[in-house]
Amino acid sequence: MIVPLAMTIYFSTIRYNLLYPGENDFVGLENFYYFITDAGFLAGAANTLILVGSVLLISVVLGVLISVLVDIDFWGRGLVRVMLISPFFIMPTVSALVWKNLLLHPVSGIFAAIWRFFGATPVDWFTHYPMLSIIMIVSWQWLPFAILILMTAMQSLDQEQKDAARLDGAGPLAIFWHITLPHLSRPIAVVVMIETIFLLSVFAEIYTTTSGGPGYETTNLAYLIYNQALLQFDVGMASAGGLIAVVIANVAAFVLIRLIGKNLTDKAS
């Protein structure tokens, strides 16, 4: 890790563009200034926050509800559980291609067929709702992770406590709010912490489907850095952006560990 990091720091302080290999002058913090003032930086930062926040919200809310549902004993529960967690083991690029060509395609996609079945005009998702499309794809990938963690946590829930609550006249909603949800607070914290760190670097889904467009509508920080490095050949500015992304990721991880990790330690003690 030290060698690539040192090289990135070095490249971020020089004018290093692959189109002009002879110009390697020292520029100090100039690359950082140009990256932060780039037209795509604020859009990329905002899209990163929207993507991370939306996927976390969907993962936690649906993960809790689905985990509670599959905790009920019914025929074929084992098969349903396997199917629920299976999308997590699909490569991001494959998942994005499936959604792009099989589900969301405006002509031959499954969603378009459903729209036409009800007499509606099919939607060109990646043109009219690009960020929503990315959120759906990434959520479909990470929801199984939340289900896996929360479903496992449900196995340790004390059934006698729930039975006692029912005898005292508590309904399903009261049991869920006062018993099930507090029991799931620690695994929810784990899901939020792990998913946040990985969601900050989402790239394959954007590259495969929208290429950051239209405009900057689906460009996050990871794709913006790729755009600077491999499309504009500006290694110096891309290195500066990479270091900024590393700082943001470490700040997020530090805050999460301090808040959530401390919360877990306090509950464990």
Image (tube, helix red, strand yellow):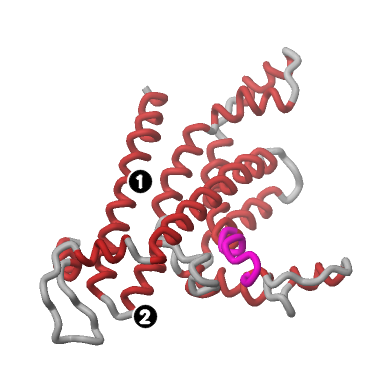
Residue on which disc 2 sits: 231
Q: Quadrant of residue 265?
A: top left
* Crowdedness near tag 1: few (<14), some (14–19) or many (≥20) residues, C-alpha within 10 Å: some
| Mark nearer the N terminus (1 vs 2) | 2
Q: Is residue 130 magenta?
A: yes
Q: CA distance from mark 1 to mark 2?
A: 28 Å
**Crowd around label 2: few <14 · some 14–19 · many ≥20 (10 Å):** few
Image location (x, y in percent) of residue 69: 69, 41
Note whether residue 86 is visible: no
- Is the residue 230 above or below the residue 169 in the image? below
Which region shows up in magenta?
126-135
Q: Quadrant of the N terminus?
A: bottom left
Q: Can you name the residue that lies furthest to the left here?
A: 26
Q: Nearer the viewer, residue 95 or 235?
A: 235
Where is 151 relative to 175, above or below?
below
The secondary structure that most of the magenta stretch takes on is helix
Q: Residue furthest top?
A: 168
- Please report the residue visible at 67 percent of the width from the left and 43 percent of the height from the top: 70
